[in-house]
Image (cartoon, helix red, strand yellow):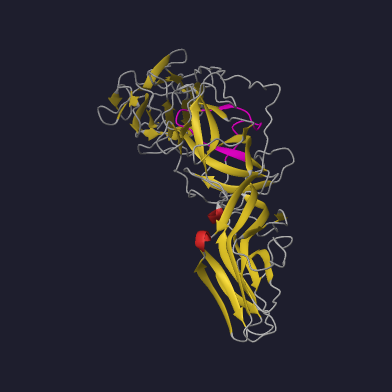
Amino acid sequence: MLSINRVKNIIKKSLIILAVFSWVFSGWFQVLNFPPKTNYVLAAQTVYTISDGSLTAATVSGGCDTSLTNTTASDGAQGTVVTSTCIGRNDTPVVKWTKTLTWESMGVPSGATVTQVDGNFKYRVAQETHSAVQAMGVMQLRDSGDSAACAASDLEASFDPGAVNANYTTRDTSGAINVSAGCDTSATSVTIRLDMTPKTGNNASATSELRADDVSLTITYFLPTFEQSAYHFFNNANSTDVGSELTANQDTPVTLATTGDAFRMRLLLHVATSQLTASGQNFKLQFAEQSGTCDTSFSGETYADVTGATVIAYSTANTPADGDNLTANAEDPIHGGDTIVNQDYEEANNFTNTVAAIPSGQDGKWDFSLIDNGATASTAYCFRVRKSDDTNIDTYTVIPQITTDDGVSPPTLTFSVSDNDIFFGTLSSSASQWADNTADGSTTAAVAHTLTASTNATNGYTITVKGATLTSTSTPGDTITAMGTEATLTTGQEEFGLRITSSGGNGTVNTDYDNTPANSYFYGATASTTDVIATDADGDDISTTYSLYYATDIATTTEAHTDYQATLTYVATGNF
């Protein structure tokens, strides 16, 4: 019996990838206008008046021997007024008239900071008998519980209102008083308090009556101003953090890598003039197709709100929910040396600073989850933040710009071989032998290794094999005959062949190797010529796996050698 020991079949792979490169330029550098526009911030005022007796009375101290009456009354042209009447001997009661309400209910806009209040009211002495000396007001601004002052001093000091008078006089002497921190935000409730002391003379029936109306505040406030101050684009990540930078530098336009890309934009808004209280202003994100440049005057652009359905849209595919707190990243944008106050991850309009207040001179940071949702290829889009009432913010220093992919997929070709060294082991003229990845080979049909291929090439790919049949490396270089016609194996006949099966994708095995009829083999390549073993007609970029079976038989007359081997080279070529 002829024995051939450990015939080694070395399969080598090589890969041809045809690549097409393109370089796309988009956009222009933004041009800095000179001279720069100056923004002036002015204080605003509103006047709130409490009239028609809508104050509530309570006795602070003292009493009246006979009676103390605190009520409302109709008083001619003045309408309904508040009145405190004391009857008794030498009484000095102190009555507080109060009303508690928010700055916003007094006409201060949401998000504003109140800085000063100037108070005044109208008064008259309605009765005064037995030489009483009246005392009128203190007028105060206090906290919602009337337990502490909310201003640096009284809005009006106590004074002698004089003699009985049929007409009302306006008390307004103190001027504007600074409002205390902690009482100055627009949503804060404060108490307006007016004290009256209807003193009586030295007589059991002495009577004093004070009346007041039109308790009024002139309120000075500042609204925070906003500047779109910095931005940075990132790849998407399924978290409240962001992926890698789309560009190394902040405030730099970028181009998306592929059509339909999801991306993240982190944006800063600088707050000035006064603090932006928590949830103090609602904003929305808008986008526009670029016209010329993404300029700060929006020349030629038509901006629209970003929604979940616009061509540049909010992306909701991530696990975090809209409004979750963002996670800071080392590559986040900065604005000079300003402190950054992190805010929210955003998947929808509107948005606000729900996480924390933003002090004047600092910047809020938001994280927008966005996606190319069918936007025109190779098109630049601009972004801006606007107030939710459709008014612009005060200043736009930077305008984020992103350009969509050109819509042309870069050429790809993927090709791999699972094992480069396979073995037949010892051959016998009485039985067929198959190669596998063990030193002894296999006595039954076995997959020696697999090839995997995919491409996005328009016309798919072609896989070829090149290499001589099993050949002894010693002189005279005897060979085992390759199977030039697809056929089943014949024991005792010298032959070397290959059959292939496929799975997945659209790859197709050449008919010479495709196992028809069943268990048939073929080998058509030589040391100098290639043979096609498989093709894929279209570039769907779905992988096909090919399983390769190598079989051999020898005859009793086959020359004995221990060094039969074959070096086969497989090449996948993309048909772009």
Foreground of the two, 199 or 282: 199
**What are the residue bounds of the magenta stretch?**
243-269
- Could you say where residue 78 lies in the image, as x and y percent from the top left? 53, 60
- Could you say where residue 4 lies in the image, as x and y percent from the top left? 46, 31
- Could you say where residue 86 lies in the image, as x and y percent from the top left? 61, 79
- Could you say where residue 81 lies in the image, as x and y percent from the top left? 54, 65
Is 394 colored magenta in this rendering? no
Task: Name the residue rendered at 67%, 68% in the picture.
Answer: 163
Residue 290 to residue 346: above or below: above
Residue 385 to residue 220: above or below: above
Foreground of the two, 305 or 44: 44
**Where does the N terminus fall, quadrant-wise?**
top left
The kind of secondary structure the magenta stretch mainly shows is: loop
In the picture as drawn, the residue positioned furthest to the top comes out as: 528
Task: Name the residue rendered at 67%, 54% in the picture.
Answer: 118
Left or right, 236 with reference to 159: left
Can residue 252 be seen in this snapshot? Answer: yes
Can residue 11 be seen in this snapshot? Answer: no
Task: Name the residue rendered at 69%, 80% in the picture.
Answer: 201
How many labels sit on residues? Answer: 0
Residue 67 to residue 82: above or below: below
Foreground of the two, 34 or 439: 34
**Where is residue 524, by image quadrant?**
top left
Task: Name the residue rendered at 73%, 38% in the picture.
Answer: 336
Foreground of the two, 212 or 117: 212
**Where does the C terminus fall, quadrant-wise?**
top left
**Where is residue 208, by image quadrant?**
bottom right
